[in-house]
Image (cartoon, grey):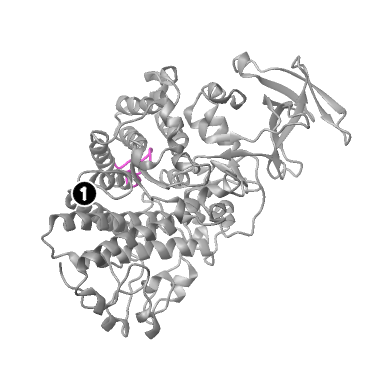
């Protein structure tokens, strides 16, 4: 293995740290100084590989929050002083510690991957070469994830809009005194860097797939499928060449003998299954229970979505919009346990029903109305009689007060128990259900897709990067953009058959009339709480609509809005060396380049 002749530094200056003489003596875990290296090449290599993957653990937390909180699958109980609230409200600022963490650890992973590549690039050892392929995968993945957060959607003139700086490796000690760093490359250049790295990874990784905990050839192919899908334009103006590449790489993964779609029943258990035992898992950021000492589970991804095993804030819930999508084929009735689950994806939602002093449930009609201020929406829960003929409010003594007649809603099957009510001068439709516990007036629809891994009653979760189900949906979308509607229908129906049943598949006429909409809907259902939704909306030129209960703004967010991209962290800009420049994103729509 090639000897290392210089100290490997903690981080690039673009991660927000300024290089000083003291920094040269500061090392991250799993690093060794020059005088330790010569006789410990193999040990250093393994330590550095472990360190590269360890960077992803910290990176994956803000990665999830940037992608998921800005979408429409969840809502929060109220305003928060936490920096993540800016992701929900689109009140973009450059001084956000979670945004900075996403940037910093993304570039630390890039730096560590690059340093390993530089250290061992001359090796003839096939095993080492294969592991170097893992480094190329991580680096390519990081550039893609950073660019989709800080760069405009690819269909918006990628050769003019800015992506992120391409800096592969940390500088040597000799270079620090005269350090110069590049400004942001274009979106097109950044994507090309990601593609080059991922293709190199695909070629170099020769070790057979073992599990999703480490990068593999298939992981590189899965990421290439997604990258090319992001480059494939909009449905109205597709780039069929890139769509074809998305199909090509999705095919490789789908045809691999290492993965298969699990059954409806096993899919319902997927959140509880360790990724190394799940046949759809391609690459995940593996987390261990040991990563969460003490109360740290409160601060993990699942901690905001639920309280499991006494751990978690449980302040973010499934949005009414997402629940409506789950119920579209037939209502999921959580009162009946698994027997009431129609769409397997509803298994990842757990309504928190309340009981009275005797341990009994109370039946209510739950529906949504505009709020009193006219600035959003609110849930209403009214008690209902056994005959399903009327609802009522209660006074301070829990006695019936105002009564409202209700009638069966004819637009759904009677057994689904949808009813209409005339309430305060307007007609609404709701469902008969058990009364739910409220948090700040919002029913607590816990999200458990990010909890209970390995059947532990905890918030243990390994963030999902790539799974097989996405490959079917990548291919379906690319097929629509290529005009291969029947092929797209087959892929979407594969996912729907597994998630629901054979009766849920689309016929040719229904699908062809709404192909783009149906593909997007299935992506939202299937990939919810995996940090994909907001990016999926904007990369296709869509509009984010959040007209459901929650404190978030209900104004639509267009793909052309300047807030679609996050600001470059101010700490990164401030730490750039004298003579170097790091350009900030536009602060208004006037600065957005669309042509």
Quarter-of-image position of residue 243 = top left
> In the rendered image of this protein, does residue 129 appear above or below residue 247?
below
Q: How many discs appear?
A: 1
Q: Is residue 235 found inside the magenta-colored segment of the image? A: yes
Q: Which residues are magenta?
A: 229-239
Quarter-of-image position of residue 432 = top right
- The image shows residue 292 at horizontal and vertical percentages of 49, 55
- Residue 324 appears left or right of 228: right
- The image shows residue 466 at horizontal and vertical percentages of 35, 43
Quarter-of-image position of residue 235 = top left
- Residue 50 appears left or right of 318: left
Residue at image point 24% right, 79% down = 35
> In the rendered image of this protein, does residue 51 appear above or below residue 533?
below
- The image shows residue 330 at horizontal and vertical percentages of 54, 21
Looking at the rendered image, the quarter that the C terminus falls into is bottom left
Look at the image and tell me whether residue 173 can be seen.
yes
| Residue 569 or residue 208, whichever sits in front | 208
Q: Give neighbour class at mark 1: few <14, some 14-19, many 20+ (Cα, 10 Å).
A: many
Q: Main secondary structure of the magenta part?
A: loop
> In the rendered image of this protein, does residue 40 appear above or below residue 306?
below
| Residue 289 or residue 352, whichever sits in front | 289
Looking at the rendered image, the quarter that the N terminus falls into is bottom left
> In the rendered image of this protein, does residue 326 appear above or below residue 509?
below
Residue at image point 37% right, 42% down = 275
Q: Which residue is mark 1?
A: 202
- Residue 154 appears left or right of 376: left
Residue at the far left in the pictured view: 124
Q: Is disc 1 placed on a helix, strand or loop?
A: helix
Look at the image and tell me whether residue 593 can be seen.
no
Q: Is residue 217 found inside the magenta-colored segment of the image? A: no
């Amino acid at each position: 293995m090639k000897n290392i002749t210089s100290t490997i530094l903690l981080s690039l200056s673009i991660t927000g740290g300024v290089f000083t003489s003291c920094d040269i003596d500061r090392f991250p875990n799993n690093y060794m100084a020059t005088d330790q290296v010569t006789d410990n090449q193999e040990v250093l290599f393994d330590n550095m590989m472990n360190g590269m993957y360890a960077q992803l653990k910290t990176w994956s937390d803000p990665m999830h929050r940037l992608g998921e909180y800005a979408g429409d699958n969840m809502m929060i109980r109220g305003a928060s002083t936490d920096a993540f609230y800016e992701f929900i409200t689109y009140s973009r600022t450059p001084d956000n510690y979670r945004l900075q963490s996403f940037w910093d650890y993304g570039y630390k992973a890039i730096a560590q991957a690059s340093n390993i590549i530089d250290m061992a690039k001359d090796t003839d050892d096939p095993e080492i070469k294969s592991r170097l392929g893992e480094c190329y995968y991580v680096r390519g993945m990081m550039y893609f994830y950073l660019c989709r957060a800080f760069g405009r959607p690819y269909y918006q003139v990628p050769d003019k809009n800015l992506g992120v700086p391409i800096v592969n490796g940390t500088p040597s000690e000799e270079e620090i005194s005269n350090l110069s760093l590049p400004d942001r490359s274009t979106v097109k250049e950044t994507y090309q860097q990601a593609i080059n790295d991922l293709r190199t990874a695909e070629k170099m990784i020769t070790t057979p797939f073992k599990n999703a905990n480490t990068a593999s050839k298939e992981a590189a192919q899965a990421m290439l499928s997604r990258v090319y899908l992001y480059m494939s334009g909009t449905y109205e103006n597709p780039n069929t060449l890139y769509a074809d590449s998305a199909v090509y790489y999705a095919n490789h993964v789908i045809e691999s003998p290492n993965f298969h779609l699990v059954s409806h029943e096993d899919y319902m258990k997927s959140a509880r299954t360790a990724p190394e035992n799940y046949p759809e898992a391609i690459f995940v950021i593996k987390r261990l229970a040991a990563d969460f000492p003490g109360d740290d589970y409160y601060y993990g991804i699942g901690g905001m979505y639920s309280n499991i095993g006494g751990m978690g804030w449980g302040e973010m819930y499934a949005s009414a919009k997402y629940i409506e999508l789950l119920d579209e084929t037939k209502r999921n009735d959580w009162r009946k346990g698994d027997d009431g689950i129609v769409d397997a994806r509803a298994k990842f939602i757990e309504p928190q029903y309340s009981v009275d002093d005797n341990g009994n449930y109370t039946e209510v009609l739950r529906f949504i109305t505009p709020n009193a201020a006219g600035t959003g929406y609110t849930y209403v829960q009214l008690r209902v009689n056994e005959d399903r003929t009327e609802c009522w409010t209660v006074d301070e003594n829990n006695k019936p007060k105002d009564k409202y007649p209700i009638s069966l809603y004819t637009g759904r099957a009677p057994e689904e128990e949808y009813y209409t009510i005339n309430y305060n001068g307007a007609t609404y439709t709701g469902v008969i259900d058990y009364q739910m516990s409220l948090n700040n007036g919002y029913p607590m629809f816990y999200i458990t897709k990010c909890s209970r891994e390995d059947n532990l009653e905890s918030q243990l979760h390994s963030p999902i990067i790539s799974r097989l189900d996405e490959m079917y949906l990548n291919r379906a979308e690319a097929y629509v953009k290529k005009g291969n509607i029947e092929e797209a229908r087959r892929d979407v129906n594969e996912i729907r058959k597994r998630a629901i049943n054979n009766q849920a598949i689309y016929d040719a006429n229904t699908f062809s009339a709404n192909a783009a909409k149906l593909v997007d809907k299935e992506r939202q259902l299937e990939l919810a709480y995996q940090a994909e939704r907001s990016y999926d909306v904007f990369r296709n030129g869509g509009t984010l609509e959040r007209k459901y209960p929650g404190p978030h703004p209900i104004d639509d967010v267009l793909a052309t809005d300047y807030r679609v991209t996050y600001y470059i962290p101010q700490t990164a800009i401030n730490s750039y060396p004298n003579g170097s420049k790091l350009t900030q994103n536009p602060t208004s729509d006037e600065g957005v380049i669309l042509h």
